[in-house]
Image (cartoon, rainbow, N blue to C red):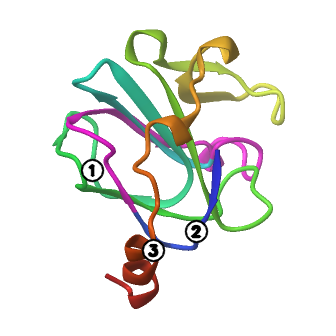
Amino acid sequence: VDFRANNDRVLAMADGEVIGSGNTDQVCPRASTGIWVLIKYDNGLANTYFHLSSVVAQKGTRVKTGDLIAYSGNTGYSTAPHLHVGVMPAAAVSVTTWASKGCPGKNYTTPVVANSLYLNPLDYLPKADSTMFKESMLGD
């Protein structure tokens, strides 16, 4: 799922551990996920954040719900600033190095999971209410 965002704070969805982060633009600019982070949560789920401007929580960091992880951005194969969020079973995802199709002869390192195992992130995020929107508009 893509969310409109431009250098906004990206927060942990639950308690867990940062499994990895990276930047595919260092291998092949504008061709893949850009700056990314993968978190595996204590509840058996994991999530990815792609197209970030920067990552705050590094590999091995234990995070709590609401901790600052990163900032949204416009890196990788992205046509505008946004936050790409994926949710999947934690056991189904791993950080893998694979051959770049966009830059032959180069290899990316990114989270990889079978397409059939992605879950809908909207099923796991808190439901929005008018209070959340007011706080967001005020910069809280």
Magenta extent: 10-33
Q: Which mark is residue 5?
A: 2
Q: Disc 2 marks which amino acid? A: Ala
Height in image: 89 above or below 68? above
**Magenta-span inclusion, residue 30:** yes
In the image, 85 versus 74, the foreground residue is 85
What separation in Å lies between label 1 and label 3 (alpha carbons)?
30 Å
Within 10 Å of disc 1 (Cα), the crowding (few <14, some 14-19, many 20+) is many
Whether residue 16 sits left or right of residue 106 in the image: it is left
- Which circle, 2 or 3, is nearer the viewer? 3
Q: Which residue is drawn at 38% across and 58% down?
A: 70
Name the residue carrying label 3. Answer: 130
- Which image quarter is the C terminus in? bottom left
Identify the image quadrant of residue 86: top right
Q: State yes or no: discs 2 and 1 in contact (Cβ < 8 Å).
A: no
Q: Farthest residue in the bottom direction?
A: 138
What separation in Å lies between label 2 and label 3 (alpha carbons)?
19 Å
Q: Which mark is residue 57?
A: 1
Q: Residue at x 69, y 17 (%)?
A: 115
Q: State yes or no: discs 2 and 3 in contact (Cβ < 8 Å).
A: no
- Which image quarter is the N terminus in? top right
What separation in Å lies between label 2 and label 1 (alpha carbons)?
19 Å
Q: Which mark is residue 107?
A: none
Q: Residue at x 83, y 27 (%)?
A: 101
Q: Disc 3 marks which amino acid? A: Ser
Height in image: 110 above or below 65? above
Q: Disc 1 marks which amino acid? A: Ala
Residue at disc 2, secondary structure: loop
Report x, y in % for residue 123: 51, 36
Q: Which residue is drawn at 27% across and 50% down?
A: 57
Residue at disc 3, secondary structure: helix
